[in-house]
């Protein structure tokens, strides 16, 4: 069933699990005395979100939003569209945006502006992956899983033409 690519980026199920345990513990320590509110950016971050929240051993709340992504293309159009907004207000909350991958930075930059305007107490970003060489807009990533080279990756929530989100690892095309 599983179809790993043969590209240069290969992150195993074990590596992902270990890193997420570390990030969860870091978040727990950083938010001692607060109740973080985690916001999952659909669709790609749904599996990362599911594992990350279970690695954070403290009371927290969560919500979900959806933005347009590449669709079946592999290049960003540079425009971000909000497809589904949050259910809950975030004013005064310690918000962490949970994203699958920061590529050009355009999506996260858009979300930072959108959510900043709603006056959260704090606003941080957790991203499973980052491709720094592709950045067009500088964005702060407070909790990062892995920095990767410029390659199109899929698996673990990230799609390849809507397929392969269910791969338990991250892989890339040659
Ligand atoms: P950015 O706005 O930072 O350029 O792109 C962010 C979004 O583009 C991600 O949330 C993700 O949906 C998509 N994306 C960027 N790089 C990749 C990639 O290598 N693989 C997949 N599947 N999606 C990507």
Image (cartoon, rainbow, N blue to C red):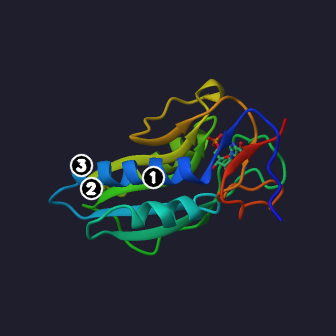
Secondary-structure class at tag 1: helix
Report if residue 114 is visible in the image: no
Please report contact status of discs 3 and 2: CB closer than 8 Å, yes or no. yes
Q: What residue lies at 74% left-to-right and 42% top-to-bottom?
A: 76
Checking the image for residue 30, the label placed there is 3
Q: What residue lies at 44% left-to-right and 60% top-to-bottom?
A: 52
Using the rendered view, name the quadrant where residue 7 is placed: top right
Mark 2 is surrounded, within 10 Å at the Cα level, by few (under 14), some (14 to 19) or many (20 or more) other residues, namely many
Secondary-structure class at tag 3: helix
Q: Is residue 130 above or below residue 16?
A: above
Q: Earlier in the sequence, mark 1 or mark 2?
A: 1
Q: Which residue is mark 2?
A: 28
List x then y, in percent, for residue 92.
24, 61
Q: What residue lies at 63% left-to-right and 34% top-to-bottom?
A: 104
Mark 3 is surrounded, within 10 Å at the Cα level, by few (under 14), some (14 to 19) or many (20 or more) other residues, namely few
Say left or right for 143 vs 111: left
Query: Looking at the rendering, in which quadrant would you find the C terminus?
Result: top right
Please report contact status of discs 3 and 1: CB closer than 8 Å, yes or no. no
């Amino acid at each position: 069933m599983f179809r790993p690519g043969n590209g240069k980026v290969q992150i195993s199920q074990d590596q992902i699990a270990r890193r997420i345990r570390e990030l969860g513990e870091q978040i727990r320590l950083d938010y001692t005395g607060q109740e973080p509110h985690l916001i999952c950016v659909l669709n790609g971050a749904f599996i990362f979100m599911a594992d990350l929240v279970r690695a954070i051993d403290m009371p927290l709340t969560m919500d979900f939003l959806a933005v347009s992504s590449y669709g079946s293309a592999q290049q960003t159009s540079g425009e971000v569209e909000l497809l589904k907004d949050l259910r809950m207000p975030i004013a005064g909350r310690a918000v962490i945006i949970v994203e699958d991958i920061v590529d050009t930075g355009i999506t996260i930059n858009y979300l930072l502006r959108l959510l900043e305007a709603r006056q959260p107490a704090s606003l941080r970003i957790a991203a499973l992956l980052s491709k720094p060489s592709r950045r067009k807009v500088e964005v702060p990533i407070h909790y990062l899983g892995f920095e990767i080279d410029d390659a199109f990756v899929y698996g673990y929530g990230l799609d390849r033409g809507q397929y392969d989100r269910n791969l338990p690892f991250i892989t890339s095309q040659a």
